[in-house]
Image: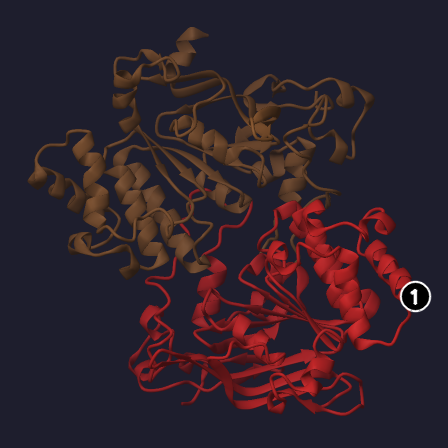
Chain colours: A red, B brown
Amino acid sequence: MDTRETILQIENLKVEFKVGKKTVHAVNDVNLTVHRGKTLGIVGESGCGKSVTAHSILQLLPSNGGIKGGKILFAPEADGEVLELESMKRTGKEIRAIRGQKISMIFQDPMMSLNPVYTIGAQIMENLKLHEKIGKDEAKARIIKLLGQLGIPEPEQRYHEYPHQFSGGMKQRVMIAIAMICNPSLLIADEPTTALDVTIQKQILRLMRQLRDDFGTSVILITHNMGIVAEACDEVAVMYMGRVVESGTVRQIFENPRHPYTRALLRSVPVLGMDDGTELESIPGSTPDASIAFDHCEFEPRCEYACERCRGGFPQALEQEPGHMVRCFLEGGAS
Amino acid sequence: MTEKHQEHLLEVRGLQKYFPVTKGAFKRVVGQVHAVDDVSFYVDSGETLGIVGESGCGKTSLGKCIVRLYAPTAGQMLLRDAGGNQQDLMQLGRRESFATRRRIQMVFQDPYASLNPMKSIWTAFDEPLRIHGFGNREKRLEIASRMMEAVNLRPEYLFRYPHEFSGGQRQRICIAKALALNPEIIVCDEPVSALDVSIQAQIMNLMRQLQKEFGLTYLFIAHDLSVVEYMSNRIAVMYLGKIVETAPAKNFSTKCVHPYAKALMSAVPIPKLDVKKGEEIVLSGDVPSPIHPPAGCRFHPRCQYCTERCKQEAPELRPLDGNPDHMVACHLVK
């Protein structure tokens, strides 16, 4: 792994959950690369494994799930050491030193992620004090400065307020402040704007772009909205049923989508200003039950180009052009 | 003018819905949430009126007032009957309103919450059919089966329970259920926002197809502008309980003139690269509280073009360039 270019590399990741007697293969053979200072978008529908992939980076999987194979390589510094996150113990010292400091995370619902009985200042302070030896006054000054940078008006006063005194968009800014206070090298944002209104979403997306540019933070942005990908990401991975079916730069994916699922996904959303007469192309059927293990391409039952070969096995990801991977028999993938 | 009004299937005039804010053991009323404040619009037979706005703008309250799940505080809701007479839904007694309730049905946002998990789909279908006197069991079963087929589900599924269906299928069932009473207007409150992207397109296509087949009129409430623009003939943009702009849906994104409507349009992420979106507007701040809405124009604290007049005088909804199809409530638009 080239640590100068790459900050995080996931190789053949496999995550399984035990649900009753069944085993759910939530993530299968996932390969992802996050480049330094870039934003990687992971898109897919609910249940496609995008959140599980992100959570497994920080060993945040629930107790009935676990990483069953593959590697997660993390290089916080260019030319520095490479850490193997998948081998760390879930509650161990090593991973705890990384969580919130080197890699932080923002969750979907800011209303649920803040503790209602502590001031927001105290909640940001908690993360800072955990990872850095820093005096109280200095810490407070740093937090207030960051709150100001994140567009919270009157940060000195807001520092002492409680979550209920903040609106949804402001709470999400506080969540970002908690995540950013230790200057992490990687920020994982799990649907950061899904619970917010479009005008607030715009503010938050702009803020995240600014963070990437000002602090040089690499970002993994998980979303189901192709519009957000076009607006905020540099690279994309499209997931379906626990596999990355296509990945590449935003330009490659939007201008030359090769996998039938990506193409269908792009055509099934209405776009502003689109002609009223055209009918949306929908993907027939619905996502299959994740607990049923497939013995062939997962998209085959819903794919309009499915042929005999697709029922024979799993296609391997094939590089179509530099950086553009597609997992489909029709695009030359071998089983 | 009265002649023209006769053509509208539903006409709403000056509709208000306030919710009291109470405090203390005696539920003293200390304020009012101005959820819907003096809203007027019309819907013609067979068309789709899209109502769009951010959370808390009163779009759901408006929908619930129209199906009378909420009793409006004031205003008129005139529904045209078969003979061309207008009936004010607010003035009707229990018995008379019973018949009109059948004509306006609703589809809710969350298909997981709107079906009773203890009851089979058939039970959910049967109750309204029985109440509204749609014949004997055989007849009712026939109607329910026909509706299931209309939404591309097998009639055998009637005897299954909600947990056996996926989100998209449940939303189809909810639509079929609303259709069963042979209504004229369906109020759809965010019918696709709880669904996955690939399923949204299925439901939207189905709704458009059913509209043609049954000659339905939709009131389509949603926060997603691209969805609303795709589904509607006309669009009304709401902000803090008021309609700020109504215009034909075709090219609404480029033709809208109200600063809020423009900002809303520019905020929609577009799944295409290198799109020219005109001026990019990022609104600062949040939507103010509907308990103490700002004086004057409700949008003025967030509006970049705000003038002294906007702070004092609330703008009326006026036709733009004398075009009655395109109404704007803004002092700055001539």
Give the residue displayed 79% in from the left and 76% down from the top. A131
Q: Is residue A201 visible?
A: yes
Foreground residue among B128 and A191 = B128
Residue with the mark numbered 1:
A138
B131 shown above or below A96? above
Q: Which residue lies furthest to the top in this view?
A: B2
Left or right of B278: which side holds A130?
A: right
Residue A79: % across, % down: 80, 90
Residue A88: % across, % down: 63, 89
Q: In which quarter of the image is the C terminus of chain B?
A: top right
Residue B174: % across, % down: 31, 45
Foreground residue among B181 and A58 = A58
Secondary structure type for disc 1: helix
Q: In which quarter of the image is residue A3?
A: bottom right
Residue B117: % across, % down: 29, 53
A96 shown above or below A233? below
Q: Quadrant of residue B237?
A: top right
- For label 1, the crowd category at 10 Å Cα-Cα, with few meaning under 14, some 14 to 19 and many 20 or more, is few
Q: Quadrant of residue B47?
A: top left
B35 shown above or below A43? above
Left or right of B215: which side holds A69?
A: right
Q: Can residue B81 be seen in this view?
A: no
Q: Residue type at mark 1: give it.
A: Glu
Q: How many marks?
A: 1
Give the residue displayed 43% in from the left and 31% down from the top. B64
Left or right of A6: which side holds B249?
A: left
Q: Mark 1 lies on which chain?
A: A
Foreground residue among A260 and A149 = A149
